[in-house]
Amino acid sequence: MAPDDRSDRRTQLLRGALDTCLLALLARTPTHAYDLVVQLERHGLPGVSYGTVYPLMARLRRQGLVGERIEPSDSGPPRKVFDLTLEGRSALSAWSAQWAETTTTITQLLATAGALPEPEVTTRVDA
């Protein structure tokens, strides 16, 4: 697989999970889109552009999952600060559960098919 193919594949995988990632970041603290991009990079997701985040935030706002307010900035024009609505918290909970279930199932399939090492099974021993 060529390097560009790997990048394209990662982009496709991320596309399905980016909205959940943004909601998770906003659940911790309200912030603006620039900071969301920085946080995604810090969490190991470089290459997500503002041109991707801004339209996605607009869609999440239209869906009622994210609210926005304008706050003054010390270093320029006012900023849109996004926060999670109650509906957004509910969606985050549901989407996170779906993500965990789906990735667990896929990981098990890949391990069973020999594409990944079998996960270690730990046995809990109560004293």
Image (tube, grey):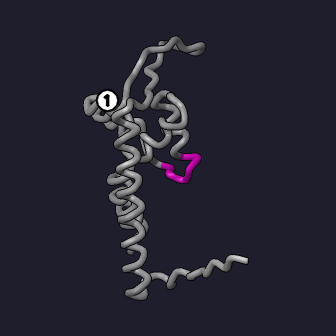
Q: Main secondary structure of the magenta part?
A: loop
> Image quadrant of residue 89?
top left
Q: Is residue 52 magenta?
A: no
Dot 1 falls on a residue whose secondary structure is helix
Which residue is pictured at 33% across the width and 37% down the height? 56
State yes or no: residue 44 in magenta: yes
The one nearer the camera, 22 or 100, is: 100
Return the residue at label 1: 61
Q: Residue at x 49, y 14 (%)?
A: 71
Residue 4 visible, this orientation: no
Residue 40 in the image, given as x and y percentages of width and height: 51, 45
Hey, what amino acid is under mark 1?
A: Arg
Looking at the image, which is closer to me, 74 or 105?
Answer: 105
Mark 1 residue crowding within 10 angstroms, few (<14) / some (14–19) / many (20+): some
Bounds of the magenta span? 41-46
**How far across and how far down the image is residue 73, in percent?**
55, 14
Q: In the rendered image of this protein, does residue 57 appear above or below residue 117?
A: above
Q: Residue at x 46, y 48 (%)?
A: 47
